[in-house]
Amino acid sequence: MKKGNVRQWALVAVPVLLTAGVMTFFRACGAKEDGSWMHCHDVQQYLAAAGALLTLIAVAALFVSGTRVCVLLRLAGLILSVVSVLLPGTIMKMCMMDTMRCYAVMRPFAWVMGGLSAVLSLLDLIGQIRSSAGTRP
């Protein structure tokens, strides 16, 4: 397997782990006693959606042959990865106490997975731009 293929499959695996993680082991706080949800539950749902969208972008980039389209897909993946890092606590508010599960478990997991996805997307974006610069007419 080529190095580029390993990086592309890692770009698929990381958002799958993000989505699965925030819905299972690294989920936000549970429901309140009255059955309603706290703000962090919404953050969890948006992180799961961002992970699913990142997965779709990465899978689409595996099957696209056009370099310009691949560059745009990687750029979209990079932006969405940064958004997933900033989502818990910066873009959307979470629980009031820093000791809650969403702060202690979900947010660090989102930072790690979103940051890893951003780094991989940036590396692949740079590689795509370099390869397209050499093939211009």
Image (cartoon, rainbow, N blue to C red):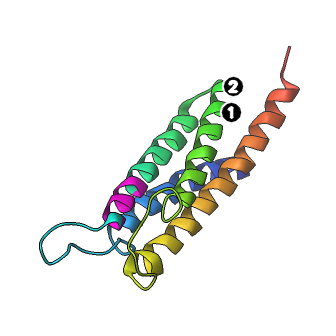
Q: Nearer the viewer, residue 35 or 108?
A: 35
* Residue under label 1: 71
* Residue under label 2: 68
Q: Indicate whether residue 95 is drawn in magenta.
A: no
Quarter of the image with the C terminus is top right
Bounds of the magenta span?
A: 40-47
**Residue 9 x, y percent position in the rendering:** 57, 51
Dot 2, how many residues are within 10 Å of its Cα: few (below 14), some (14-19), or many (20+)?
few
**Residue 85 x, y percent position in the rendering:** 56, 60
Tell me which residue sits at (85%, 28%) in the image. Answer: 133
Tell me which residue sits at (17%, 66%) in the image. Answer: 36
Residue 87 horizontal side relative to residue 70, left or right: left
Query: Marks 1 and 2, how far apart in space?
Result: 5 Å
Amino acid type of the residue tagged 2 in the rendering: Arg
Q: Secondary structure at mark 2?
A: helix
The furthest residue to the bottom = 99
Residue 60 horizontal side relative to residue 8, left or right: left
The furthest residue to the left = 34
Residue 68 horizontal side relative to residue 88, left or right: right
**Residue 28 x, y percent position in the rendering:** 35, 71
